[in-house]
Amino acid sequence: MGPAGLASALVASGALQDDWLAAYQAVPRDMFVPDRVWPGIADGTRQHPVMDRAKDVDAWFAAVYSDIPLTTQWDDGSHTGDGVGETPSSSSSQPHMVFSMLADLGVEDGNRVLEIGTGTGWNSALLAHRLGAENVVSIEFDAEIAKEARENHREAGLSPLVVVRDGRLGYPEGAPFDRVEATCSIGEVPRSWI
């Protein structure tokens, strides 16, 4: 499909709205996707075989610009994703979901945003492009994933603050925030976010 085709599909679906289009164009998803990914279907219940950029760049690129989630890590990095019974522990979310959540976030110029769950860094990069890097703090539990996200940000010319800690603790050092977005799963909203 490619970047333009995905943008068209997201705009047609209503997920990608005009106020996020410039960020989408300036912050390409492929800059935030590792060389090995496992494309899933939208509900995340089934994974396809690994897509390896080094082995088939066209298939990898097609997966990156499909409206599907991409698993980027299994079992907190202890497995490769090639076995049975492994659990996805980090991903690049489905683009439709990313832009639907950003639309629901309802940010305005000058807002400060706390993101819980940095992952590949694409979402925090989109926020940094739209609001300015100084207005975005992203928390990631996994130090290696946080390091990779920072590298992705740097390559994209963006520098939101990425903090390694348990996201349930929030980031009181930078509070107050105008918006909080969780891009990870949670059982209940921690009081610290409020």
Image (spheres, grey):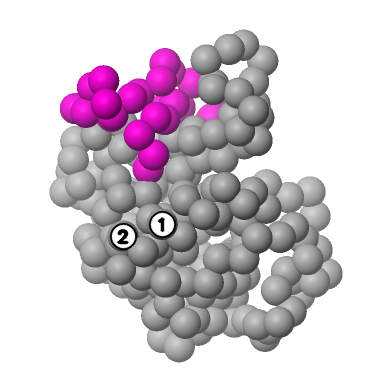
- Residue 181's x, y, as percent? 59, 64
Residue at point 39% right, 62% down? 153
Q: Residue furthest bottom?
A: 110
- Asked which secondary structure carries label 2, the reply is helix
Tell me which corner region of the image, top left, top right, bottom left or bottom right, holds residue 27: bottom left
Residue at point 40% right, 80% down? 132
Picture layout, residue 124 above or below residue 73: below
Q: Is residue 8 left or right of residue 20?
A: left
What secondary structure is the stretch in magenta mostly built from?
A: loop
Q: Residue furthest right?
A: 191
Residue at point 49% right, 21% down? 47
Picture layout, residue 176 above or below residue 83: below
Q: Which residue is mark 2?
A: 155
The numbered dot on residue 151 is 1
Picture layout, residue 131 above or below residue 101: below
Q: Residue furthest top?
A: 84
The quadrant of the picture occupied by the N terminus is top left
As measured in the structure, the alpha-carbon distance from the residue carrying label 2 to the one carrying label 1 is 6 Å
- Asked which secondary structure carries label 1, the reply is helix
The residue carrying pointer 1 sits among few (fewer than 14), some (14 to 19) or many (20 or more) residues within 10 Å by Cα, namely some
Magenta range is 33-60
Instruction: Tally the marks.
Output: 2
Magenta region includes residue 95: no
Q: Amino acid at mark 2?
A: Glu
- Residue 142's x, y, as percent? 64, 49
Let me know if residue 127 appears in the view: yes
Q: Are marks 2 and 1 in contact (CB under 8 Å)?
A: yes
- Residue 178's x, y, as percent? 59, 82
